Image (cartoon, grey):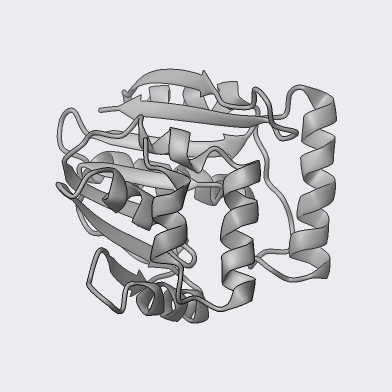
């Protein structure tokens, strides 16, 4: 597992707001644990990569991974490029996930992204990922489950503040699904699936859904 100090070192020249965000994010979200569920080599496309935090974690976890990050927000992509200005770790591209096509990959990751996308478009995105994957490839979804309810409601409140009031993330409405629904969607394409709960010790209902073609 990637050590937090490696991430902090990567962000050492970032502005104080970015450094604070990274420290908070790593405290409230098990991104470092998610990295351990991915293959150690291959082409990974991080859909909805934002400012690149998880993309960098993937690269630090294994230099044999080829990482491409896609996001709609050009300001966040510029921040990602700034972070790696000392040396190129990942490639970043501007793209609207609901409209654009994706580059081929061995693994597609969607880390807390789909809940901001309408239900029917969630399925379209996942189907496109599945069709582009080679046999044995993976779709990795990290989302918030709807259970336990107290964690779900706490997360909903925080997201309302972050998205609707502060405007931190693009989106006006939430489209959460129970973890079993994500599994069911991937199975309908033909994936072998597994579900991993990652919320122990967290106030949030973190869950990982893994689909293999």
Q: Residue at x 56, y 78 (%)?
A: 15
Observer able to see residue 53: no
Image quarter of residue 178: top right
Observer able to see residue 135: yes
Q: Residue at x 46, y 70 (%)?
A: 12
Task: Establish if 60 lies above or below 103.
Answer: above
Task: Establish if 176 lies above or below 10.
Answer: above
Residue 64: % across, % down: 14, 47
**Exactly how many numbered labels are in the figure?**
0
Task: Establish if 9 lies above or below 75.
Answer: above
Residue 31: % across, % down: 49, 42
Going by the image, does 74 lie left or right of 55? Answer: right
Q: Quadrant of the N terminus?
A: top left
Q: Residue at x 83, y 68 (%)?
A: 165
Q: Say which of 11 and 144 sits in front.
A: 11
Q: Say which of 67 and 98 sits in front.
A: 67
Residue 35: % across, % down: 38, 38
Image quarter of residue 46: bottom left
Q: Quadrant of the C terminus?
A: top left
Residue 48: % across, % down: 46, 59
Q: Say which of 135 and 152 sits in front.
A: 152
Image quarter of residue 34: top left
Task: Establish if 173 lies above or below 133.
Answer: below
Q: Say which of 192 and 23 sits in front.
A: 23
């Amino acid at each position: 597992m990637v050590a937090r100090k490696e991430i902090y070192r990567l962000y050492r020249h970032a502005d104080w707001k970015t450094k604070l965000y990274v420290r908070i994010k790593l405290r409230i979200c098990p991104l470092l644990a998610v990295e351990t569920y991915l293959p150690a080599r291959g082409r990974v496309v991080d859909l909805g990569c934002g400012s690149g935090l998880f993309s960098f974690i993937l690269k630090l976890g294994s230099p044999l991974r080829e990482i491409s990050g896609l996001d709609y927000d050009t300001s966040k992509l510029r921040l990602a490029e700034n972070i790696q200005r000392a040396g190129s770790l990942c490639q970043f591209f501007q793209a609207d996930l609901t409209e654009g096509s994706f580059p081929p990959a061995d693994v597609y990751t969607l880390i807390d992204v789909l809940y901001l996308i309408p239900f029917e478009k969630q399925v379209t995105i996942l189907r496109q990922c599945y069709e582009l994957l080679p046999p044995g490839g993976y779709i990795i979804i990290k989302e918030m489950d709807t259970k336990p309810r107290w964690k779900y409601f706490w997360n909903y409140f925080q997201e309302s503040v972050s998205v609707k009031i502060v405007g931190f993330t693009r989106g006006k409405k939430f489209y959460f699904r129970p973890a079993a629904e994500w599994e069911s969607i991937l199975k309908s394409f033909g994936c072998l699936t597994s579900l991993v709960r990652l919320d122990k010790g967290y106030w949030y209902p973190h869950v990982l859904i893994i689909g293999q073609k």
